[in-house]
Image: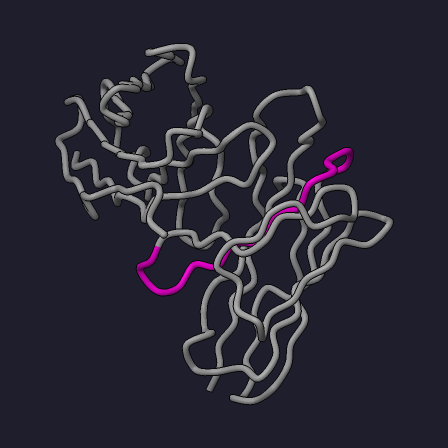
Amino acid sequence: DQQVKQNSPSLSVQEGRISILNCDYTNSMFDYFLWYKKYPAEGPTFLISISSIKDKNEDGRFTVFLNKSAKHLSLHIVPSQPGDSAVYFCAASAMYNDMRFGAGTRLTVKP
Amino acid sequence: DSGVTQTPKHLITATGQRVTLRCSPRSGDLSVYWYQQSLDQGLQFLIQYYNGEERAKGNILERFSAQQFPDLHSELNLSSLELGDSALYFCASSVNLEGYGANVLTFGAGSRLTVL
């Protein structure tokens, strides 16, 4: 069941520009959304999250936007750096319950 | 080091065999989650345990089983292995206390299973 969808398998941007990664979900019970970053040969690591009571959360170069009516969230990285090149997973959960992940988007930031 | 330990890191076995993957959660974390990542696929949720009890079940095959022990470590047992079971298996843990709110998962480095 694809409750969390990342429709773009890959994204390539130039260093210094904005990277926008998108995610859609279908389960209206989800109330907490997260982005994880994964480098090769490592487990995913937590990047940023947002609660359903908010529509924006910012942490340095990373901002997550949530549009509940559209069941859509996005991650903005500004400015993008080569070290940001990784696979980014969107995840969602309902309170206390399991966490569902999207298929991931591979971001490549070119110098 | 994330604090979540998975063993073995790599495992090669034959079809029809049985393997056990082990996970030690981060100190203080009560919940353990298991995920499967096949080639170029996302993280497929398998199962979650909270303080020794099964909390949620995802797309886990009947040939697979898991448990969480009193010391909170967890094992994922995969039996009658097929070629398609070749994947990275991730364990994650979280505090997940009742009333704490939503939780952030901390992942281990994964166990890569190759079935020949």
**Residue at screen point 26% across, 27% down:** A72
The x and y percentages for residue B33 are 60, 48
In the rendering, at what x and y percent does residue A102 appear?
34, 44
Q: Nearer the viewer, residue B11 or B79?
A: B79
Residue B91 visible in the shown view: no
Is residue A45 depicted above or below B34 in this figure? above
Q: Which residues fall within the magenta stretch?
A: B27-41
Q: Is residue A73 magenta?
A: no
Image side of residue B106 versus residue B30, left or right: left
Residue at the image point whose x is 59% and y is 53% from the top: B47
Residue at the right extreme of this rendering: B70
* Percent position of residue B15, x then y: 52, 88
- Residue B11, quarter of picture: bottom right
Q: Residue at x 15, y 39 (%)?
A: A12
Q: How is the image coloured?
A: one colour
Asked if residue B46 lies left or right of residue B71, the reply is left
Seen in the picture, residue A69 relative to B113 is either above or below; the reply is above
Callout count: 0
Q: Which residue occupies the extreme front position in the image?
A: A28
Q: Position of residue B90 (x, y in %)?
A: 54, 54
Asked if residue B27 can be seen in this view, the reply is yes
Give the quadrant of the N terminus of chain B: top right
Magenta stretch: residue B31 in it?
yes
* In this view, B9 is above or below B33: below
Using the image as rendered, state which of residue B19 and residue A33 is in the foreground.
A33
Say whether residue A49 is left or right of residue A8. Answer: right
Q: Is residue B73 above or below residue A33?
A: below
Between residue B34 and residue A87, name the one nearer to us: B34
